[in-house]
Image (spheres, rainbow, N blue to C red):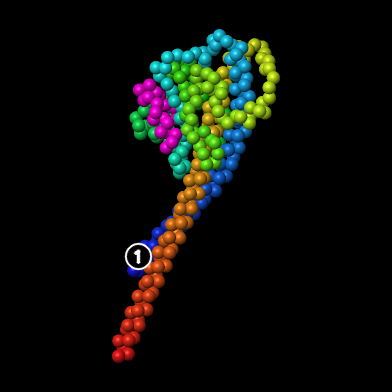
Amino acid sequence: MAANTRDIRRRIKSVKNTAQITKAMQMVAASKMRKAQQLALDARPYAAALRKMSTALRRLDSEQTHPLLEARPVAKELLLIVATDKGLCGALNTNLLREAAKFDPTKTIFVSLGRKGSQWVARNKRDLLADFPLKDAPTFLETKTVSKFIVEKFLSGEVDRVTVLYTDFKNTLTQVPKTVQLVPVTAEIEQADFHSTQAEASVGGGDILFEPSAFSFLDALLPYSVHIAVYNAVLEARASEHSARMVAMKSATDNAKSLIKDLSLEYNKLRQASITTELLEISTAQMVLGQ
C-alpha cells in the first residue's frame, strides 16, 4: 500500500511540473500570438490595394507579354511549404503536410520554410531543392530572399509553376491549409483570399493612373506581387502557429490539472484505506492483549 501511495505522489509531482511548463508555454504563445495576429491583419489592406492595382494593370496589358505571365505545360512544379520550426502546436503541421502529400512526387520539387517542412520532405524521400530558416518575427526582406529564389527558378525554366502551401489564419481556434499559385501570375494570386473583404473597403474606388507607362509599372509590380504574396503567406502561417500552440498548451494544462485531481483522489483513497487498516490492526491487537 505504501509503495502505491509513493508511486502516486511521484506521478502527481511529475504532472505538476509538466503543468507548470505547459502553462508557461501557453503564456509565451499567447503573447506572440497577439503580435503575429496583428501583423497579419495589418498586412491585409496593403495586399488588397496591391491586388487592385495589379488587376488594373492586367486589363491594360491585354497582350500579357511579361515572362511571369507565361503559362507553360507543367512538367515540373515547385511547392513552397510554409511550416513551423517547432512542434507542440496541435494538428497544424499534420493538416498542412497532408495537403503537401497530395502533390505528385515525380513532378514536384519542394522548398521549405520551417524545419518541420524539410523534415517531412526528407522522411518521405521527396526532392528538397532548398530549406530556409523561419524566425518568430520574419521581415519582408527575409522572405524576399525566398520569393526571389523561386522566381528565378521559374524564369530559368527549371520549373513551370510555383505554388505556396501555408496555413491560413481564420481566428484563434481555426486555421486551415491553403494553396495559392504564385507564378505564372494569374487572377488567383490577385484575388487570393487573405480575408480582404473589409480591407478592400478601405482601398476605395476610382481609376488608377500609371506613369511612365502601364507596362513598365507592370514589369516592376509583378515580381513585387510575388514577394508580397510570400510575405503574406508567412505572416498568416505565423499567426496560425502561435494561435494553435496557445490553444494546444491550454488544453495540455487543463488536462494536467484534471489528471492531478484524479491522482489526488486516488492517493487520498489509498491513504484512507491504509489508515483504516492500521487502526483495525491496533484494535485487534488491543483486544487480544485484553483477553
Residue drawn 37% across the image and 79% down it: 279
As rendered, which of 202 and 130 lies closer to the eye? 202
Residue 74, given in percent of the width and then of the height, sits at 42, 17
As rendered, which of 123 and 195 lies closer to the eye? 195
Q: Is residue 290 above or below residue 272?
A: below
Residue highlighted by disc 1: 4
Q: Residue furthest top?
A: 63
Residue drawn 59% across the image and 41% down it: 34
As rendered, which of 43 and 123 lies closer to the eye? 43
Quadrant of residue 222 within the rendered picture: top right
Q: Which residues are magenta?
A: 94-112
Specify few, some or many for label 1: CA neighbours under 10 Å numbering under 14, 14-19, or 20 or more. few
Residue 25, given in percent of the width and then of the height, sits at 51, 48
**Residue 264 seen:** yes
Q: Amino acid at mark 1?
A: Asn
Q: Is residue 5 above or below residue 191?
A: below
Residue 267 within the segment the image draws in magenta:
no
Considering the numbered disc 1 on the image, is that residue within a helix, a strand or a loop?
helix
